[in-house]
Image: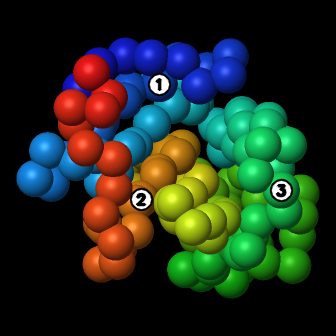
Amino acid sequence: MFDGRLGSEEVFVVYFFRSDRLTRGEYTVNADFDDGDKALKTRKKLLRTLIEQYGQPAKDKRRWNDDFHKGDPEQLGWALESGDVEFITTWHRADAEITLRLVDDSGMELKLEYCSPEHLGAQPSTPLSALL
């Protein structure tokens, strides 16, 4: 676990290993999002960067926990702050599943996660020794 950067954002980085192989990496934005609109702007900026690097996502969904604000795009920030909506974007690649997630679960969290096929139950990933 350590601090790092993802584009212009400061992030908290965690790597997960299984049998000395990197299987998952998480990058959590170290911003104290005081409102949903600020979090949405940061997500949009990261999403653009990820689309440039990986192409269009396989899935880009809003998961509504309460649809009170669902029909009002001006209220997306408030819906996020209220925990009423989550944003989940996923890319499927041969070497990883990449997910950008913005949720408010006891505080807004914007996280980018890379999961190897090994972590998802398929073929092995990069040995730790190859990364050192």
Vertical placement of 61 versus 48: above or below? below
User: What amino acid type is highlighted by mark number 3?
Assistant: Gly
* Residue sitting nearer the eye, 47 or 34: 47
- Quick check: can you spot residue 108? no
For label 1, the crowd category at 10 Å Cα-Cα, with few meaning under 14, some 14 to 19 and many 20 or more, is: many
- Quick check: can you spot residue 6? yes
Separation of marks 2 and 3 at Cα, in angstroms: 17 Å
Vertical placement of 28 versus 18: above or below? above
The label number, if any, that marks residue 11 in the structure image: 1
Looking at the picture, how far across and down is residue 86, in whole percent? 59, 66
For label 2, the crowd category at 10 Å Cα-Cα, with few meaning under 14, some 14 to 19 and many 20 or more, is: many
Mark 3, residue position: 55
Between label 1 and label 3, give the one nearer the viewer.
Answer: 3
Q: Residue at x 28, y 38 (%)?
A: 15
Tell me the SS state at disc 3.
Answer: loop
Mark 2, residue position: 115
Vertical placement of 56 versus 4: above or below? below
Cβ atoms under marks 2 and 1 closer than 8 Å = no
Pick out the residue farthest to the front: 130
Residue 87 found in image quarter: bottom right
Tell me the SS state at disc 1.
Answer: strand
Separation of marks 2 and 1 at Cα, in angstroms: 17 Å
Q: Which of pointers 2 and 1 lies earlier in the amino acid sequence?
A: 1
- In the image, is 43 to the left or to the right of 88? right
Between label 2 and label 1, give the one nearer the viewer.
Answer: 2
Q: Quadrant of the N terminus?
A: top left
